Structure formats: structure tokens, C-alpha cells
Image (cartoon, rainbow, N blue to C red):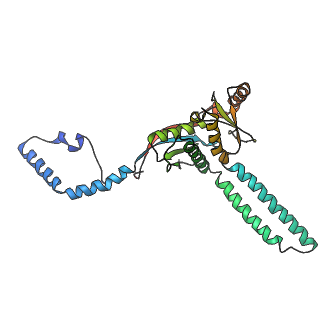
Amino acid sequence: NENTIESGVDRLDLGTIKFTKKDLTKLNQETIERSRDREELKKRWNESLPLLEDMEVSNEVAVDKTFLPTVLLTDARKILTYAQAIALTELIVYIILDFANGPSQLLYPVFILSLIVLNIIWLRYFLYKSPYKRLELFAEAVRKALLASGHLQTQNCKARVVRGDKNSIHTATYLKGGTLREKEIFAQALSEFFAPIENQRYILRATTWVNDQTKYFAVPSMFDKRKEDVIVFVANIEKYIGLYEIIYTRNVEGRHILLDARLNALGNKQERTFSKKKVTSKLK
């Protein structure tokens, strides 16, 4: 049988006890017998407590997959284009030499190597198209930005992604380890980044053309007090989502861009994220 730890007076079944001399004598005998088996009781507690120690309250942030930035795809596409160009050039030269003076022994291994690199890049490209991997990488980037700015103090905490139903429109992430306050800060940072564009002090605008709803994002409020903090935040995430410029919305030019962001961001018409608390442990 699985070990269970119960609390409350209901576990004693006091309501079923008949306070007669016979029943009270039986109850006393059962209590004495249970008290004698202390080693078994100690063993059950030792087996159950490690499960309780591994329990952790997490703040999950579920993000609409539609709004996940194209994590690493910007750089992957660029590398993929270069690799394709090299392989195609080698192939064309090889064919020309084959018709003219015979195949070059030097170009043949270079062409094979280019094809191998090309396959690796394609594999990397499709790997990062996964919404789980994209959110995991971005959540880790946010964690690093929070650590760099001093908002998180626990160095060994990690960003984790909940791999749920593939047909679900949401993908959830949470901070593993750290204090409850740090978990709340992490969840708040992610929620505010994906929040609809309203009247944030700083927003981010893509410097290259994007074919999805990721042209504008908001800078979380814990970073918008100083321009230096905004720069730290962007420096940690742009390597994953491509190049974004910082827009200060408290001047004339910034207000104009803010209006454009409000009109064009689909996130302003629906919620991109929602948060919930959850207990995780070995029992799951």
C-alpha cells in the first residue's frame, strides 16, 4: 500500500466510537499495539517525507504559441542561406569542371562537407521551430536578464517548460528553484513582455521584417526605470529573437510609434498569456 499522511480528527473515526466499556477497552488495545510498532511507523515517515521536501510551488505562465518570437530562427535562416549558397556554388563549379577538364579532386570533399553542414543547419532550423524549444530558450534569456540586473539572486534556478497537449494553443513555463518572490518576478517579467501594447514606458520594435505577430513587444516594468536596465534586458534576449530597437514612448516620436503598435499588434485584441500557481513534486 502507498504511504499516506493524514491530518484532522476525522482520521481517528471518533464519530464511530461507542463509549462503552467493551469498545473503549478494544480501542485502548489497538492504540497500544500501534505504539509498539515504532520502527515501521518511522520507516513510513522516512519514505514519505522526501516527497514532501521535493514539492515546490511554481508560477506557470502560459503563452499563446502565436506570439512566441522566432527564437534563433533569424540567425539560423542567415546561416542556412550562406550554407546553401556555398553548396550550390560548389556544385555549379564541380559540374562546369566535369564537362571541361574533368572533376576536381579538391572540390569534391569541399562539396561533401558543405552538404553535411547544410543538413546540420536544416536540423537546427527545424528544431527551433518547436514552440517548446522557442519558449524554453526565451524564458532562459529572461532569467539571465533578471540575474544580470539583480532581480534574481538564486544562481542555480532554471527556466522549465511544461510539455502539454500538442494541440493546445498555449505553452507554459515556470522558474524551477529560487524563492517564491523570485518565481513571481520571473512570471511577471514574462507576462509583461507578452502583454498587449498599451502605455508602457519602453517597447521593442523589430528592425527587420517579420511575418508574424512579433513586431512589437513590451519591456517588463522591472527594467523600465533606467535606460541602462532596458539595454541589459535587450542584450540578453536579442541573441534569441533577433534584432529589436528600444523605443522610448514618452516623447513625440515614441508616441507615434506606440500608436502604431497599438493598432497593429494582434495581442491588443486578445490576451497573449495567463498565469496560474501549481505544486510540482515527485508525486506528479
Residue 100 visible in the snapshot: yes
Q: Quadrant of the N terminus?
A: bottom left
Coordinates of residue 88 in the picture (x, y in percent)? 82, 61
Q: Is residue 104 above or below residue 158?
A: below
- Indicate left or right for 210 with 60 as reference: right
Residue lying at the far left of the rendered structure: 21
Q: In front: 15, or 275?
A: 275
Left or right: 227 in relation to 13: right
In this image, 22 relative to 117: left or right? Answer: left
Which quadrant of the structure image shows residue 227? Answer: top right
Count the labels in the image: 0
Taking the spot 73% from the left edge, 24% from the top edge, the residue there is: 252
Q: Which is nearer the eye, 111 or 267?
A: 111
Residue 204 placement (x, y as % from top left): 68, 36
Residue shown at 12% from the left, 47% from the top: 27
Whether residue 70 is visible, yes or no, is no
What percent of the width, then of the height, locates residue 231?
A: 65, 39
Q: Give percent across and percent down for residue 65.
A: 61, 43
